[in-house]
């Protein structure tokens, strides 16, 4: 007898709590309406709720900062809401990602259908109604598949959670309130300014990071890995 999931697969339906492999999920999801959004975390389907203004504005703000970093760091790439094929039970759509490009020896790849395959070095989630999932289920799955660092921007608490997933521990900002991302030297984020959407202060802090010796050394290291070098 066919299982509920198999029946839904034939009908191209997907609901919260369905259990699927990544291959099953991807096949069904690719045929769903464009406005339908879901993720596969630990083999379980999570259908996304409609996003509210607070999520959207903070998402854009953080994405802008990542974009500025990428513009000053050749060999890196940032994006938002892109499907990431992590493994047999994982296909999330993180709010933001930042990765080292595969041609610069980053740990993720890009397949022939233009999907990211493997774990980007940094993932970011904007958390409001999804906070419990973001801080626990997603964190565990991201760690399982090799994401190096993870940020959760809690809109309810006005707090930025920062995790070193390799060491399985939370990290704290410096005494100045600045989060200095380890995998991407020079990516400096001031959480208070981020939640206040204080663009001038955020940019001042980020520019300090981009002017740091650590960032210069990172850019030089990536340059040596550039194709043709």
Image (cartoon, rainbow, N blue to C red):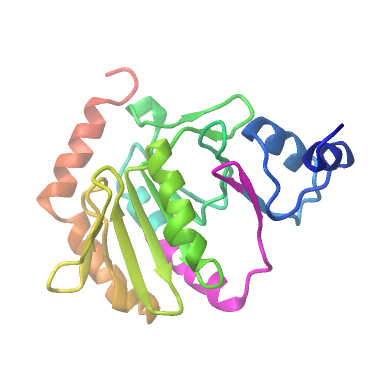
Query: Which image quadrant for residue 153?
Result: bottom left
Residue in the image at 32% along x and 17% along y: 228
Query: Which residue: 38% across, 44% down?
Result: 143
Q: Quadrant of residue 204?
A: bottom left
Say left or right for 229 vs 77.
Answer: left
Residue 70 in the image: x percent, y percent? 36, 49
Foreground: 6 or 24?
Answer: 6
Vertical arrangement, residue 39 with respect to residue 207, above or below? above
Residue 120 can be seen, yes or no: no
Q: Quadrant of the N terminus?
A: top right
Which residue is drawn at the image coordinates 25% and 33% (left, top)? 222
- Say left or right for 2 vs 54: right
Q: Is residue 173 above or below residue 105?
A: below
- Give the extent of the magenta segment: 40-65
Left or right: where 45 falls relative to 141? right
Q: Residue 45 magenta-drawn?
A: yes
Question: How many callouts does the rendering have?
Answer: 0
Q: Residue at x 13, y 54 (%)?
A: 212
Percent across and percent down for residue 132 are: 49, 65
Name the foreground residue: 166 vs 173. Answer: 166
Say if 163 sits above or below 12 in the image.
Answer: below
Q: Please, which residue is most extreme toward the top here?
A: 228
Quadrant in which the C terminus is drawn:
top left
Is residue 132 magenta-colored?
Answer: no
Q: Residue furthest front?
A: 1
Q: Residue furthest bottom?
A: 196
Q: Position of residue 206 (x, y in %)?
A: 26, 63
Front in this rendered view, residue 141 or 96: 141
Is 210 left, or right, of 143 in this rendering? left
Q: Position of residue 131 (x, y in %)?
A: 49, 67
């Amino acid at each position: 007898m066919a299982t509920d999931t198999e029946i839904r697969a034939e009908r191209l339906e997907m609901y919260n709590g369905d259990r699927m492999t990544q291959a099953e999920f991807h096949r069904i999801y690719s045929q769903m309406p464009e406005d339908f959004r879901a993720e596969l975390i630990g083999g379980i389907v999570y259908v996304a709720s409609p996003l509210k203004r607070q999520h959207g504005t903070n998402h854009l703000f953080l994405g802008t900062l990542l974009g500025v970093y990428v513009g000053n760091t050749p060999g890196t790439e940032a994006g938002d809401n892109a499907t990431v094929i992590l493994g047999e039970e994982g296909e999330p759509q993180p709010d933001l990602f930042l990765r080292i490009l595969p041609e610069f020896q980053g740990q993720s790849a890009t397949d022939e259908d233009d999907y990211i395959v493997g774990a980007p070095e940094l993932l970011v989630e904007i958390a409001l109604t999804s906070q419990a999932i973001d801080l626990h289920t997603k964190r565990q799955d991201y760690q399982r598949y090799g994401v190096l660092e993870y940020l959760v921007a809690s809109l309810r608490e006005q707090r930025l959670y920062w995790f070193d997933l390799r060491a399985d521990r939370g990290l704290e900002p410096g005494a100045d309130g600045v989060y200095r991302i380890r995998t991407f030297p020079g990516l400096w984020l001031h959480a208070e300014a981020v939640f206040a959407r204080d663009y001038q202060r955020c940019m001042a802090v980020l520019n300090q990071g981009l002017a740091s010796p650590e960032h210069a050394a990172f850019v030089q290291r990536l340059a040596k890995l550039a194709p043709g070098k």
